[in-house]
Amino acid sequence: MSLEEVRPIIDCFCQILSLHGFSIITSETFRLAKYDQNEATVPLYKLIFELIHFDSNPTNQELFKNKFSQMSKDEIVNIIKDDLYKRGYTYDHFLSLDNNMEKGSRQLLVCLGWLIYHIKFIEKCMKLCLKSISNDNQTDKDQNVKCDLIEQIKQAKRSNLKVRSRLQAIEHMDLQENRHMSSFEIQLYQYPHLISQYLIELDKEHHKLSLFLYWNKHENIFWKWMESVLDQPITIENNELLRDVNCQYLEAERQKFNAAIDTLDSALVQLEQLWISNDNHQSIERDVSLIITSIDTQISSLFNQLLNNKSLLRKKSFSE
């Protein structure tokens, strides 16, 4: 898969990050990291550092952004490794990276993919967006199922378009049409600068909602590209490439991993259908939560196993 095919979805991800207070990062950084270029190392360390401290409060998010530049490299890397290890990311190649932040961008890119899946980063951002729109404290309780979450995003976008259209109509109304307006609309009509401010905010909201829908539609491209990162050969200091000796064994491991993912995906679909069809959500909420947590743990374990098996094969290839 070429970068041109995947660039739009990576750009979408980068924009979502930026809109939620993260430091600016571009698809070029992802490209460099795929080929293990050192220029991408520090930006990815910074992004991972900000992700593990992700906070819905913009002020707190800004504090952690600033902390990155105030702390030593050794301290930052140790915090990241400790945090990810506790979350279940125990891949040796990542944990053995030097603390000088000079190398290892590909390992960091793989780690980033694991982390955003593990913490359900995009879903968290969707929920925050919906909560800011509805200002409803019950939002999280109603959004446990991803398909339901996407429907709410679509509904929010439709409402956004409807309000924008009405505000634009008010802008162009003349005084004789005041009788068709509500008292609030008349107030807006009398203060056109308020309409402009509302439209700006609605445009920002519309852009964010559109990004979420684009991600939901095309995220499979992102994950396929991330999988291709694992296929990149590891380079050593003399720039020779390590090649796998037992490709058949590695392919068998990959097929086992993919088959397990398919099985888990099927289980998730069944859980979602059960959740939607059952009116008494509280009676099954705890059981569903435990099952989903178990599934996430299995996926993390399988992912680490795949990485470690590939690493062992490459070590074997080099030693022979």
Image (cartoon, rainbow, N blue to C red):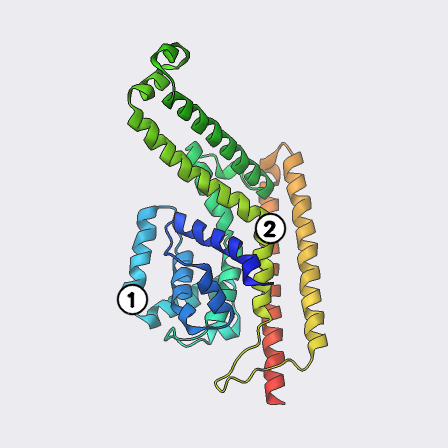
Q: Nearer the viewer, residue 281 or 140?
A: 140
Q: Quadrant of residue 146?
A: top right
Q: Is residue 136 visible?
A: no
Q: Nearer the viewer, residue 291 or 116?
A: 116
CB under 8 Å between discs 2 and 1:
no
* Residue at screen point 67% across, 82% down: 245
Q: Is residue 249 visible?
A: yes
**How many labels sit on residues?**
2
Residue type at tag 2? Ile
Q: Quadrant of residue 192?
A: top left
Quadrant the N terminus occupies = bottom right
Relative height, residue 232 to residue 169 (above, below): below
Image disc number at residue 254: none
Where residue 132 sits in the image (x, y, percent)?
A: 41, 37
**Farthest left residue in view:** 70
Where residue 226 sits in the image (x, y, percent)?
A: 56, 62
Which mark sits nearer the N-terminus, 2 or 1?
Answer: 1
Residue occupied by mark 1:
71
Q: Nearer the viewer, residue 54 or 202?
A: 202
* Residue at screen point 60% across, 50% down: 292
Element type where label 2 sits in the image: helix
Where residue 215 sits in the image (x, y, percent)?
A: 54, 48
Q: Nearer the viewer, residue 21 or 32?
A: 32
Residue occupied by mark 2:
292
Quadrant the C terminus occupies = bottom right
Element type where label 1 sits in the image: loop
Relative height, residue 251 to residue 53 (above, below): below
Give the number of the mark in front: 2 or 1: 1
Residue type at tag 1? Met
Does residue 70 appear left or right of residue 81 in this picture? left
CA gap, disc 2 and disc 1: 36 Å
Relative height, residue 142 to residue 267 (above, below): above
